[in-house]
Amino acid sequence: MYKGLSFSLLILLLPVSYRFFSHGLFFDGLTYASISRNLAEGVGTFFKPVYTLTLGNPSYGHLPMAFWFSSVFFKIFGDHPLLERYISVSLGVISLVLLYLWAKSISKTRWIWIGFLILSPILPWAISNYILEVFILLWTSISLLILNHSFKGPIFPFLGGFFLFLSFMTKGPVGLFVTVYPAVYGFLHKVEIKKILKAYIFLILGFFLPLLFLLSFEDFRIYLWKFLDGQVFAGIVGKREITPSRFYILARLAIEISPLIFLLILRLSFMRSVMLTNGFWLSLVLAISSSFPFVISLKQMPFYIVPSLPFFALAFSELGGFWEIEERLEKFKYFPAIIFTLLILNLLLIFASKNRILSRNPFYIDFALNPPKIEKVHRKVGVCPDFLYSDWETVAIAQRYLKLSFVPGWMEYTVVDIKNCKIIPQNCVKIHPKNPKRFALFFCRN
């Protein structure tokens, strides 16, 4: 049983392992890591998190649960430059193990669907890039395990609702798709309507009681409104990043799960009959609930579908009767040797990733891996040319690795793009690095 789980996880971790000791995150991940690290160091609060001293001060782009949760690890382990990757990978693995435990209770297919997730490259990418969807996977997987017992007593739906509150406090309404689960589960298992309604009463209480407590603080009311107005409502009316169509997310979803669909079709061609099991319907409804509602917004990113992918993989595995393959693999004489080989391969990829840079931004070479010999404290620095102030990736790297906050123009310390900065004042001298690839730090005397 757990041999199979290890086998699937080790397959999924192959594209993650070669990033493990490397530098270079998607800049959203760098942003979230900076906010978490700052919160751990007392720069910003739960109600007013801070990104930089200039941009995002305070930062209302996302609700603060993931930042606060991660700040605990920053307090324990300090400002390690790769800590956010370790947090992200760990939470991704824990979430999949929890989903495995949940899947065992509702599906004949137990573990092979986890290995299939390597066919959707965006999920391994998200696990290694500290994306908020990884936190949503964690809270929703815990909630699902608890909600499996919704009709055994009020404490279970109440606790399930509380973890949905944590999911909501990570990225807003997109973390609430698990609310459909008790109704679908109750319908499929012919649970009395009274029991379903009772479960929802306590689920709602578990969600709203902590939310109402936070709403008693004016700072949180301001925070929540700014988040909803700036992210949710702006996305719905098309005032944020705009995709060509509201159905872009579904097109991207079709691309991501197309290998899974192909594998399913191939498998079905060898089957005499198909059983539409409860496990299939439960997983499919959760997958659809997690991904399809994004059509309401014009602000869509490919990684938004990440929480839905495990459920699509489980639904297709259940539909295709892949439990038969699981049983054959577990009985295979050399199955333990395959697991051991996968483990060694992952370890080799991990150590081969040391000091690799998974980014084209030369700021990593000039500053992140070769930091200047100045005290690493939060400070405002000038930039030349001024457009560096809104070069989001460079801003994110500078803040995460060096705690630098950009200000247009020249200051005592100024970060210079040597290829684009036209005029350097005579009182300013380059102090780092000796041979810059593109970026340099100048010190300007008064």
Image (cartoon, helix red, strand yellow):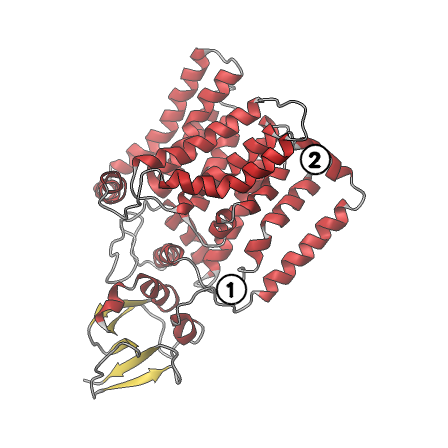
Residue 263 lies, in percent from the top left, at 60, 38
- Tell me, for residue 43, which label it has, or none: none
Residue at screen point 64% across, 31% down: 269
Q: Which residue is mark 2?
A: 325
Compared to 420, does 20 lie above or below?
above
Foreground residue among 274 and 96: 274
Question: In the figure, residue 277 lies in which quadrant?
Answer: top right
Q: Quadrant of the N terminus?
A: top right
| Residues at circles 2 and 1 in contact by the CB criterion of under 8 Å | no
- Tell me, for residue 22, which label it has, or none: 1
The reply, left or right, for residue 10 in relation to residue 419 is right
Q: Is residue 76 visible?
A: no
Considering every residue shown, the one lying at the far bottom of the view is 426
- Residue type at mark 1? Ser
Q: Quadrant of the C terminus?
A: bottom left
Mark 2 residue crowding within 10 angstroms, few (<14) / some (14–19) / many (20+): few
